[in-house]
Amino acid sequence: MMARSGGGPPATPTPTEATVGSGAQGALSALRVLTVLTPRERFAPGEAGAIALLVRRMADSAETIVGLPPVGQSFAGVRFVPVVPVFRPFSRIQRYAAGVARVARSVRPDLIEVHNRPDVALALRKACPGLPIVLVLHNDPCGMKRARTAAEREHLGQAVAVVAVSEWVRGRFISQGVTSCVRVLPNSLDLSVLPPSAEQREPVLLFAGRIVADKGADAFVAACARILPRHAGWRAEMIGADRFGPDSPETPFLDALRPQAEQAGVGLRGYQPHEAVMQAMSRAAIVVVPSRWPEPFGMAALEAMGCGAAVVASHRGGLPDVVGDAGLYADPDEPDDLANVLERLILSPALRAEAGQAGRARARLFDAATMREKRRLLHEDIVREWRWKGLFRA
C-alpha cells in the first residue's frame, strides 16, 4: 500500500449500489447508441472539452454522436451528426432537444445517452417515449437545472436511467433521502495513447488545470514559495489559464497570482493543448492536484497517474475515488501541510518511484478498453430493464 498523508478509499474504483453490467446474461447484438453532447460541447480536434474527449474514447462502431456543428472537421473514425436546433417558440434547451429528437427519428437508436444535462434527458424522454434514456452525470447534480431538489432528483431517477462518473457524484444525487438507483461508471483513460514516461523524470512540481482559486492554484504557489528555496535544482511549473483555450482572458485572480508565482520561482506556461499537457506529465516527477472545489471525478489526477508521475491531491469530491491508495493527500487550505507532503517526495526518490508505480497500476483500472466493455454491459442492462420504466409520466 502506498504511504500517504491521511486516509484513503478502497482500492477498487467502482463499488456501486447497482453493479455495472451485473445483469447481462450473454452479449446482445451491438446496440445502436445515440450519444448526446451538452449544448456547448463540440466534437472536433482543438474544440472538444472534457466530456467530448471522453465520449470519443468510449464510442464504438455502432454509435452516433450528436452535438453542435464544429468549426472544423469532427473527429475521424466516429460517426458525428450535427444538431440543427428546431426554431420554434421554445427555450434554447428545448430547441436543442427537439433537434436531437429529429436526429433520433432518423438514426433509430436502441438507446439515447445524454451527458450532464437533466433537462435535455427529460425533454428527450418526453419526445422519444419508446426509447431508453441514460443520463450520465459528470458534475454535482444538486447544482443542475431539473435536479437541484430532492423531489426533482427522485423524479429524474424514475424517468431516466442515471449513471454517475464517481461515487461522490452518486452520493450527491441520492442525498436528502433520494431513493433512486444510480449506477457508477467512472471516466476512462486510453493508456495506449499516453506518451512514454521518461526514464529519468525531471525535478519538476507540476500543476496542470484551470488557474483559479477553486483548483487551488494559489495554494500550489504558496507551497512552492516555502520549499523551492530549500531545494536547489527543483522547479515548479503551472500549465493552464482561467479557461480552456488560447483565448482565455487575463482575470483579476491570474493578474494577482503572477507576481506571487514569479517571486516563488513558479513558471506560468499558460494554456497548452492537451497533448502538450500529457507530455509535461510524462516528464515531471510530481503532479499536484490541490483542488478546493469538490472535483466530481479528477481527470487530471488520473492522467498524471497514467503518465507515471507521483501524485499529490486533496481529499475533495471524487479525487479519493480516483487516486485511492496510489497517491499522497494534502489540504490545500493548509499551506504547511501541502508544503510538507511535497517536501517528503522531493527528499525521497524511493517514495516518488513507489508513487509512480502505484499510480500506473491504479490507472489501469480505468483503461478505456475496460470501461468500454463495462459501458456496453450497462447499456444492455438498461435496455433489458426499460420495460419497468413505463409506469410514470416524464
Image (cartoon, helix red, strand yellow):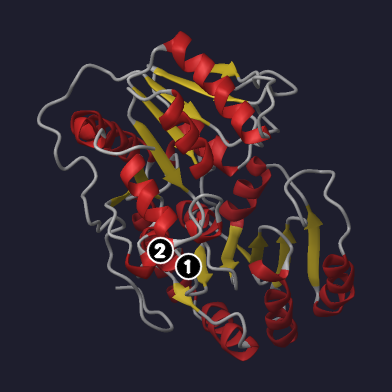
Point out which mark residue 317 bears: 1
Quadrant, the N terminus: bottom left
Instruction: Write the residue at 53% across / 68% down.
Output: 294
**Amino acid residing under circle 2:** Trp
> Does residue 118 sit above or below 47 in this rendering?
below
Nearer-the-camera pick, 83 or 60: 83
Q: Secondary structure at mark 1?
A: loop
> Does residue 283 sit above or below 388 in this rendering?
below
The spot of residue 19 in percent (x, y) is 21, 49
Instruction: Give the Cα distance between marks 2 and 1.
Output: 6 Å
**What residue does disc 2 label?**
168
**Amino acid residing under circle 1:** Gly
Instruction: Write the residue at 32% across / 20% down.
Output: 110
Question: Within 10 Å of the Cα at label 1, are there few (<14), some (14-19), or many (20+) other Cα atoms?
Answer: many
Q: Is residue 345 visible?
A: yes
| Left or right: where 303 falls relative to 159 | right
Nearer-the-camera pick, 94 or 266: 94
Q: Secondary structure at mark 2?
A: helix
Nearer-the-camera pick, 370 or 379: 379
Q: Is residue 79 visible?
A: no
